[in-house]
Image: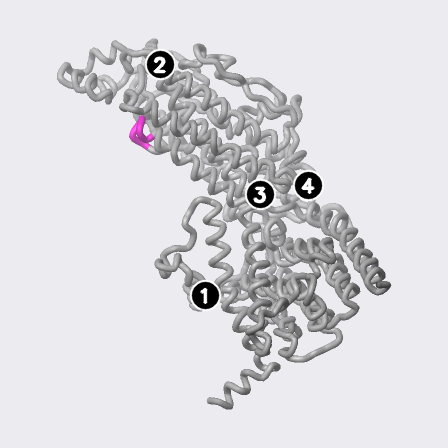
Amino acid sequence: MSLEERELEVLIGPQHPASGHMRLVAKIDGDIVVELRPNIGYVHRSVEKLAEVKKYLQIIPLVERPSLADTTANNLAYVMAVEKLLGIEPPPRAQYLRTLLAEINRIHSHFYGMGIHGVMIGSSTAYMWCFGDREPLIELAQELTGARLTYSYIVPGGVRRDLPQGFEDKVEKVMRYLENRMPDYFDLYFNNPVTRARLEGVGVLTKEDAIKLGVTGPNLRASGVPYDVRKAEPYAAYPELDFDVITEEAGDAFARVMVRVREIQESIKIIRQVLKKIPDGPILNEKYMKMIPPNLRKQVEETGHIKFPGVFANLRVPAGEAVARVEGGRGEVVFHIVSDGKMSPYRMRMVTPSFRNVILFEHLTKGARVADIPAIYGSLDYFPPEADR
Amino acid sequence: MQDLLSIIMEPYVFVPLIFPGITVAFLLLLVIIWLERKIAAKVQLRYGPLYVLKPLGGAIQMVADLLRYLFQEPIIPKTVDKLAFIMTPALLFGTAYLPTIAIPVSPTFYAFRSDLSLLIVLALSTLAPIFTVVMGWASNNKFSLIGGIREGYIVVSYEIPMFLSALSMAVLYGSLDLVEIAEAQKGIWGIFLNPVAAITMLVLMYMSTSKFPFEIPEAESEIVAGAYTEYSGILYGLVMGASYVKLYVLSLVFTILFLGGWNPIPGFMANDPLLPGVLLFIKAFIIIVIGAFLRAVYPRFRIDQAMDLGWKTMLPLSIISIFISLVEVMIMGGA
């Protein structure tokens, strides 16, 4: 029998319980994957083109939508690029609030990824636990921003809302809950012999390959490359905070999960520091604060909820180019904005971590078993809408 | 009426139709699937089935599901092998429940008594997987095909060690008659005499009925629903029920082999031919519930890992269990 006859082409998705919004074209020989090509683009929504006809403030909700579960990173990176063009800096308190939301978001984004991964290898308990424990963090974000997922919290020059009253105590309660909860995850899921058997040594990404393929985020750090935008090019309040870049050496699916778990612990550390160090002061740049009408400004100072100054409606950004990078939950988010001085960007480029990681599907599954496909897929925390944009 | 009742109470009618046959199997199906979902929900910090009969925690959820299966259109794709596609669910369910006829209810109540009833039960229980493989082929779907083949691979890796560990108990008791085996455990249960055989058989039972962590032929995230992918309506209801019925049958066998069957019989039950069956059922039910609980604990193995477990761990263990039996027979025979 020739090789071609031995191979069976299986189309996994887009109507498949575990494919997500994409199709995986797998060629399998018995139980061995000969080739797996991801067929992406099913949820392309033309964010970059739409941005060219939308006003600068309208783009904030637009860029958030593709990366559900990890929206703050996109929000922050976009606004940072706009701020670079505007030449304004947010006040220190706003920087800390941005960091706070980014870290809350990172934790629940990691829970989201680990939960999906859990159910992909058959542990419905890991799935339910992760999604259940994601809830307190979403509640926190809701209390802070008013929305559960798409916060649109970060605006040019600052943030939309100040800390609510008694927020510190609520955060501390959630953080303590998470710390007490983590051992349960280890007992039932991470140290489960079946989990270990399914994930250890599966989908190994070597350090050299990880760098060569331009992989980003926890997937890169799981291969032993200590690269994190928060350290490499610090932004927001990160330069003033003390935290470690988490790396694992093994580079397999289990290492990728472990990086996420340890990053959750690191994020808890960061959130505590933020709440301890956060300075008093305004949450919106002075320039914009002055533009708010006096009676409304009084209201803003009382409630801590920003009323947008009129200039935001038709925000004009000086001509030029700006690039901003942010370390999101899934990896590095890059925004490149080209402005020609009009009310919409001339061109906006949005590079999401999932798009950079999609190459791993083909690279890691070669020679793996059919059952490893979901185990590797889940470990990448790949999110099709984020890659398709 | 009296005549009808007396006919039903005849062992050769009662066993296949009531207990351990179709009626109890069916009721168990309704309870165990609900219980499995409820246990998993408890571990996973959620409610599980709730709204169908709320005071009892959604206890008749499966009745509602069954009604849905009954009235849902069973879609038969154009490209399938029609005869095989339609026949296999019924045959699968039928063969899964067939071994119950050879299972005794009490020392005096059985459909028929045979010197070889253990062998008959085991032999009949091997029929069902054939239909899963046929199903995978008849569905004309790649996922079904992979699922059918996986079932085939799993069968060859659990069947031999499972039978060896079951037969090691026959060696120990010097009989293949289930009634005699159960009666031999009046004092000490088989699980204490040969724990290796008990563990081997328990694990392989869950493997043979696609319980977690061995839910490999139906792995949802890999091959949709394996051999059952194309099935819908009551046809799917039947194939889904079949593995539970098979677990029920094997649990009864396990109870008789290792947990003393109906022993020890309390005094008030001693004179009734049927009541000891209640004990048998309760013990088997506990074994099934343990299987249902595993869903909340384990992810699923990869197929090569499951086969490794079958061939490299369970087969040696089952051979060891035969030696344990032989040694015990020699010691006890000598004494």
Q: Where is residue A53 in the image (x, y as percent from the top left)?
A: 32, 26
Q: At 27% across and 18% down in the image, what residue appears?
A: A315
CA separation in Å, label 2 and label 1: 58 Å
Comparing A348 with B284, the one in front is: B284
Badge 1 amino acid: Leu
Q: At 66% across and 65% down in the image, what residue appears?
A: B260
Q: What stretch is highlighted in magenta?
A: A142-147
Does mark 3 fall on the same chain as mark 1?
no
- Location of residue B239 with respect to B292 vertically, above or below: below
Please say if the residues under marks 1 and 3 sit with CB atoms less than 8 Å apart: no
Residue reaching furthest left? A295
Comparing A77 with A282, the one in front is: A282
Precedes in sequence: disc 4 or disc 3: 4
- Location of residue A197 with respect to B215 vertically, above or below: above
Residue under label 4:
A34
Residue under label 3:
A121
Q: Badge 1 sits on which subunit?
A: B
Residue under label 2:
A278
Please say if the residues under marks 2 and 3 sit with CB atoms less than 8 Å apart: no
Q: At 70% across and 48% down in the image, what residue appears?
A: A30
Q: At 69% across and 70% down in the image, what residue appears?
A: B183
Comparing A88 with B291, the one in front is: B291
Crowd rating for badge 4 (residues with CA inside 10 Å; few <14, some 14–19, many 20+): many
Badge 4 amino acid: Val
Badge 3 amino acid: Ile
Disc ID at residue B66 = 1
Badge nearest the viewer, 2 or 4? 2
Q: Badge 2 sits on which subunit?
A: A
CA separation in Å, label 4 and label 1: 41 Å
Residue A161 highlighted magenta (yes or no): no
Badge 2 amino acid: Ile
